Image (cartoon, rainbow, N blue to C red):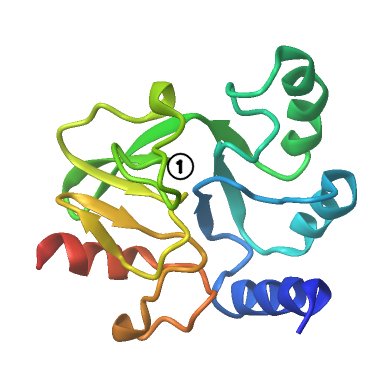
Amino acid sequence: TDLDHMRETIIHNWNNVVDFDDTVYVLGDAVMGQREKNLPHLARLHGNKILILGNHDYPHPCNKESIREKWTPLYGEYFAEMHNTLEIEIAGEKVLLCHFPAEGDHTEEERYGGFRPKYDGWIIHGHLHVEEMVVAPKHIHIGIDSDYSTYGVPRYSPIPVSAVERIMLS
């Protein structure tokens, strides 16, 4: 109904499925709007949070150095790690976690070309603001607004690695 309701719903959904010792990869755009007011809400989220920086995260290299210098320590209070991209293993395959897909955007203009990954394997990403899970070959979208209900995942909830594995193996 409003921003407070949205925030509280997301926190509830997160904490309903994430335990304190779970690792959660946040694929960018962790907070928006008034960051000094909104960042502290991240402390309410369970788990060991690792941020893959998105274009709306002030520590991302698309921002001016002065902005990055100011905000990186503040983001660091809520994330165990921060990366531009990160390679991990899922379903026995190396995958690249990145905020951006290799191509495509939710606007008519494809933006942030210098930050798009060049990767031959699976890319797990956010950024698009669409419901679709698979947006291109070997591209899996796990943004907060993606729809994984066919995998038993409630809307606006963290996407479990088991759902990503099922997509990769299908």
The one of 66 and 122 positioned closer to us in this rendering: 66
Taking the spot 90% from the left edge, 52% from the top edge, the residue there is 37
Query: Residue 150: percent from the left, percent from the top?
Result: 29, 84
Residue furthest to the front in view is 108
In the displayed structure, does residue 158 sit left or right of residue 162? right
Q: Position of residue 60 (x, y in %)?
A: 61, 28
Residue 140 image point, x, y percent: 29, 56
Question: Is residue 19 placed above or below 42 in the rendered structure?
Answer: below
Q: Residue at x 32, y 30 (%)?
A: 117
Image coordinates of residue 99 in percent, x first then y, are: 45, 42
Quarter of the picture containing the C terminus is bottom left
In which quadrant will I find the N terminus? Answer: bottom right
> How many residues crowd around disc 1 within 10 Å: few (fewer than 14), some, or many (20 or more)?
many
Q: Secondary structure at mark 1?
A: loop
| Residue 2 shown left or right of residue 99 in the figure | right
Q: Amino acid at mark 1?
A: His
Name, please, the residue furthest toward the left.
170
For label 1, the residue is: 99
Q: Is residue 37 left or right of residue 148?
A: right
Q: Name, please, the residue furthest toward the right.
A: 37
Q: Is residue 169 above or below residue 50?
A: below
Q: Nearer the viewer, residue 77 or 143?
A: 143
